[in-house]
Amino acid sequence: MKDKLKIDIFKTELLYIITSLIFVIVHNLNIDDRYSLWIIPMIIIIFSHIYTIKKNNLDINKKAYIFLIPILLILFSIVIVNLDFSNYTVFIILPILVSIFYFSLTNPNYKLSIRGLKWFFKLVPGEAITDLSYIKLPSKSNSDNASNIAKGCIIGIPIAVIILVLLTSADHYFAVFIEKIFNNLEKVLNIDFLIYDVAYPFMMIFALLFITGLNIIRHKDDKLKDIKISDINKVMASTILIIINFIFVLFLISQLSKMTTNFLNLPNEYTYAGYAREGFFQLLLVTSINFGIIVYFIYNTNIIKEEKSIKNMLLLLILFSVILMFDSYYRMILYISAYGFTILRLQVMLFLAMEFIIFMILVKKIISNIKGNESLIFTIIILTTYILNLYLCTDNFINFIR
């Protein structure tokens, strides 16, 4: 494995040591937690890896640098729009987006897809002990011993701490003895500060940098698994789509009756406010289910190329989905006109707009039967919607448009 990693390990770890020390200094400057715990560590990790990648001429796809724009927009939204740590989506999406950037930059086989998203786990330090074995010192006299001592400390100290905790909890006399040792040391050194504000942050950020950096290089030649094309029976597929479309026909008939003369003679005591509130999020979920069905038939089967009737039924399903989206949009407009804008209602409007654009792309693909992967287009649309959500769906913007 080591000969497969064509990088200068010593220079790399020296860079990571320097950036880890910078992090420790910033960590102790008593600044806003959003900077010290999130923005600065992310910037350190991102640009340290970029430097390592460029230094070793591994940035084979320079177009991938475009991902830095959404990465930085999402990262700085934490401060610009005053997000707090309760907005957990940022802390999920950003690491995944960073992993997409690294693999797009270094791996010629990487493609944006659902399978590509799973590559995030390739950066996870699943082989931490193995990865840390790459740490080395300059090749001078006694460097082997010094390197082995360093590795032994990295492995031995955590084990010793675990044993020490177990022994002190098992024997009170021994616990008092250890406590006395630490009390004496504390008189000379500020142990708490050295452990919790220096050693711990340094080791955490260095280990994270070193392990993720090695994993980026380690997987630079990996290949995505081929999409498994399902050989779905055309009769079964037709049956599924006929049943689903029939349900939508019934639903649309009922909506037409409810909104006009009630020709179905059903109890109808709706107000506009009641109509606006009823079943809105269920309709969004239904359109999402439809999207999943349509994407499966387009990208996981060849049936729409072989059966025109299947293609037409998928187009019909998209039509029903768009009608549901406009129904949801109309309900939300009524709701907003009655009760005003809120963050959630604005988020829903953005989501509906995103869904509509994606469905139109799918319509074009089905009709024109163009070969290709629209993952990049979908990614741009989803990221744009998400960034607009971060910057617009805030109390300040809601107060502005009111």
Image (cartoon, rainbow, N blue to C red):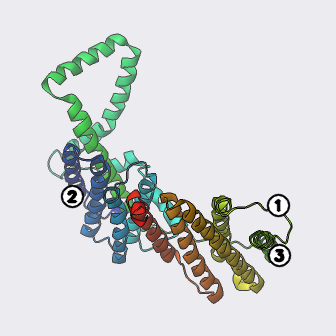
Residue ID at (62%, 89%)? 368
Foreground pick, 375 / 2: 375
Residue on which disc 3 sits:
235
Name which quarter of the figure residue 263 lies in: bottom right
Q: Amino acid at mark 1?
A: Pro
Residue on which disc 2 sits:
11
Between discs 3 and 1, the one toward the N terminus: 3
Foreground pick, 284 / 208: 284
> Residue 267 — which label?
1
Of the residues tagged 2 and 3, which is closer to the observer? 3
Say what secondary structure mark 2 lies in.
helix
Q: Picture coordinates of residue 361 (x, y %)?
A: 57, 80
Of the residues tagged 3 and 1, which is closer to the observer? 1
Q: Amino acid at mark 2?
A: Lys
> Would residue 248 be found to the left or right of residue 361 on screen?
right
Say what secondary structure mark 1 lies in.
loop
The relative height of residue 46 versus residue 141 in the rendered view (above or below) is below
The relative height of residue 394 versus residue 165 in the rendered view (above or below) is below
Distance from the alpha carbon under mark 2 to that under mark 1: 77 Å
Q: Within 10 angstroms of label 3, few (less than 14), some, or many (20 or more) residues?
A: few
> Residue 95 — which label?
none
